[in-house]
Amino acid sequence: MTSNQVGGKDEGRSKKPSHSQVIVIGSGPAGHTAAIYLARANLEPVMFEGMLANGLAPGGQLTTTTDVENFPGFPEGIGGPEMMDLFRAQSIRFGTKIYTETVSRVDLSSRPFKYWREGSEGLEPETADSIIIATGASARRLNLPGEEIYWQAGISACAVCDGAVPIFRDKPLAVIGGGDSACEEATYLTKYASHVYVIVRRDQLRASKVMAKRLLSHKKVTVIWNAVTLEARGDGNLLQSILIKDIKSSEERELEVNGLFYAIGHKPATQLVNGQLETDSDGYIITKPGTSETSVRGVFAAGDVQDKKYRQAITSAGTGCIAALECERFLAEEEALGKDGDPVVPQQGYLGTDNKDGIKTK
C-alpha cells in the first residue's frame, strides 16, 4: 500500500492539494462509500485515511476483524482487512486521491474550510469547499493481561458482528457491562451460546427496566454481581477462560468461557472538531435527523462518529452514501449562488441531541 495514491499510482508527499471541492477524513466503510459516490460525480474527492488515526490502521475498526459475515455480497464471508482493501481499490478506481496522512486541525469558522495535516500545523492551511467527517469510533477496552493475544480470537466488542462465528457457537460466553448495551449484547448472544455470563461491577444493572427484566428472566443468562475481570486466558490461539474477582470478598476464580464481549461503550473520534461542531454528551457528532448534516453548513458526518446505536459496517456505508449525495447537492447549490468565503452560521432549524438515539425534540 503506497502512502499517497491517485488511480493506483504513487504520488509524492510534496504534491499536496492546495484546494479541493471536498475532502473526506476517515477511511472506513463510511468514508470510502462517500468517496466512491463523490468520485463518480466528478467532484475529485481527496481522502485522508490517517496514519494510525484513532489508534487504528487505515480502514478503521474492520482492520481488526478477522471475518465479516453479515455484509451483503460475500456469501462465504470476508476478512476485515481484505474488505477494506477492496473498498480502497474501488475508491481509487473512480479517481479518489488518497493520502495516508492524518488531518490534525480544521478551522470550520468560514468557507472555504481550512485544514492542516499532521506535521504541517505551522504552514499555510489547505482549503476545501466541503468536508465529510468519517473518523469513526473505537471500542473502549480494559487492557487486560491476555487481551491483545485473544482480541478477535475470543475477545470482541461487537456481539452482532461476531456472535454467530463458529468459535462462539454452543459455547459459554461472557459479557462485561451493566447498561443497555450489555443487556442487548448478552440477549443477542443467547441465540448462539450454550450459556451467557454477564459480569457486572455493581450490585445492580444500569440498564432500563425493560432491558434488565428481559436479561434477568432469560434462562440462558447468569449475572455475576460485584465482579471485575482480571485476565484473559487461553492456549495462545483461542480464549478458554477468564479470571474474575469478587470486589466485596476479594475472592478470585476462573470462569471457563470461549468468548468475552466488551459492552462498556465506544469513544467517537471527534477531538478534531471539538468546539466547532455540535456533539452530544458522549462526544458523538450530532446530525440533523434523517440527514448527515452537522451544525455547520457544508460539513457532513457519516459512520460511527455520529452513530452510537447501530455501529455496523453496512449502516456506516449507508450514511457515507447519504453524506456524499448531500455534499454533492450542497456544492451544486453553492456554485449556483456563487458564494465563497462566507462566514459560517449554524444550520437553520437544526435540532441537537443529548439522548442515546441521537434525536432531540424541542
Image (spheres, helix red, strand yellow):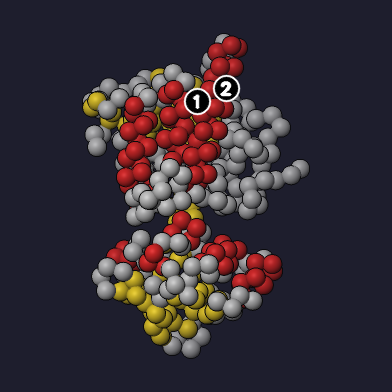
Q: Is residue 216 above or below residue 18?
A: below
Across and down, in percent, residue 227 comes to: 49, 79
Q: Nearer the viewer, residue 297 or 152?
A: 152
Q: Which residue is mark 2?
A: 330
Between the residue at mark 1 and the residue at mark 2, the CA separation in whole angstroms equals 8 Å
Tell me which amino acid carries mark 1.
Ser
The residue positioned 50% from the left and 25% from the top of the image is 130
Q: Is residue 56 left or right of residue 223?
A: left
Tell me which amino acid carries mark 2.
Phe
The residue positioned 24% from the left and 37% from the top of the image is 1
Asked whether the residues under the numbered discs 1 and 2 touch, taking CB atoms below 8 Å apart as contact, a structural biologist would say yes
The residue positioned 45% from the left and 86% from the top of the image is 250
Q: Which residue is mark 1?
A: 130
Work out whether residue 119 can be spotted: yes
- The nearer-to-camera label among 1 and 2 is 2
Q: Which class describes the residues within 10 Å of circle 1: few (<14), some (14-19), or many (20+)?
A: many
Q: Is residue 281 above or below residue 157?
A: above
Across and down, in percent, residue 55 comes to: 36, 50
Residue extending furthest toward the front: 75
The residue positioned 54% from the left and 64% from the top of the image is 188
Q: Which quarter shows the C terminus?
A: top right
Kind of element beneath mark 2: helix
Kind of element beneath mark 1: strand
Identify the disc placed on residue 329: none
Residue 183's image quarter? bottom right
Q: Is residue 4 above or below residue 79?
A: above
Q: N-terminal of the two: label 1 or label 2? A: 1
Across and down, in percent, residue 108 comes to: 51, 30
Q: Is residue 187 left or right of residue 81?
A: right
Q: Is residue 308 above or below residue 212?
A: above
Residue extending furthest toward the right: 362
Q: Nearer the viewer, residue 199 or 321?
A: 321
